[in-house]
Amino acid sequence: MAVRIDGKAVAAKVRSEIAEEVAALKKQGVQTGMAVVLVGEDPASKIYVRNKGKACAETGIYSEEHVLPENTTQEELLALIEKLNADPKINGILVQSPLPKHLNEALIVEHIDPKKDVDAFHAENVGRIMIGDFAFLPCTPAGIIELIRSTGVTIDGKNCVVIGRSNIVGKPMAMLLLHENGTVTICHSHTKNLKEICKTADILVAAVGKAKFVTGDMVKPGAVVIDVGMNRDENGKLCGDVDYESAEAVAGYLTPVPGGVGPMTITMLMKNAVTAAKIQNGLV
């Protein structure tokens, strides 16, 4: 039976370390600050924003929430971003996605100062991740690296398979594993012999967005299996991309849904905010 990787426990440990860093910066006269921008009434986005506010409070980070109506124009949103870019109280800016369809999300992201881009979505930060010269880590992949480390399994030299090639998880996840000297394969909807490839993985990251897509017969015995998915099963119950029951019988380590990757994503956002504060105050 696989050992359950407790994302809440790992996140709590990292947040405690972040709180200590924030307190140490305060003693040097630096208050870490973050602004979250929410446009519209998306229920899931409201929950995420609320959780980010709680995480800021827990770690001692100053936070602002800018809640804008659904019909906010591109010009109005860009004007707010320019204001936050120039605000010395704000070290990190996060524009919550998805945005209403009339707004150009790519253009919005490109207007955020790269030094305040705590999501690491700006093209400059994405490029820096590619070449290994980065300040900010993309939050979900960075959280996954922490979860893997918590098992005591080293990534160096391991066969790593990532299912999914999104810009937010799949691609940056592959790069972070590569930077840790893993041998990385990216799989996607056009991949042939997916089951056979997955079974070679010492570390398997499922980020495909399909409920219970990865089954136990796709898992190498003893593998570390990280489930990034957030789906609903046929009964409406929250589940991941991995069929937990069948994978649990084969894997060495396995993240649950919920309580696995999710808590780490917001935690690493806080860590990026601290990094941003240090950079902007000449402390790194």
Image (cartoon, rainbow, N blue to C red):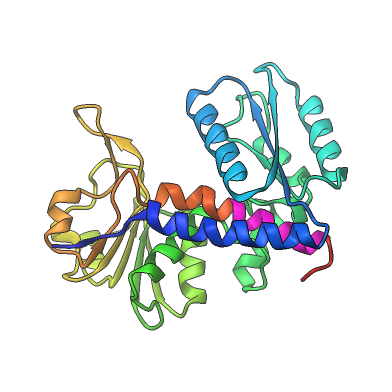
**Is-magenta flag for residue 67?**
no
At horizontal 76% and vertical 50% (from top left) the residue drawn is 91
Q: Quadrant of residue 188?
A: bottom left
- Residue 182 in view (yes/no): yes
At horizontal 30% and vertical 45% (from top left) the residue drawn is 257
At horizontal 64% and vertical 59% (from top left) the residue drawn is 126
The quadrant of the image that shows the C terminus is: bottom right
The quadrant of the image that shows the N terminus is: bottom left
Most common SS among magenta residues: helix
What range is drawn magenta here? 270-280
Q: Residue furthest bottom?
A: 157
Instruction: Relative to 181, say whether 242 is above or below.
Output: above
- Residue 167 in view (yes/no): no
Q: Quadrant of residue 190?
A: bottom left
Residue 103: x percent and y percent?
Answer: 68, 28
Residue 187: x percent and y percent?
Answer: 35, 60
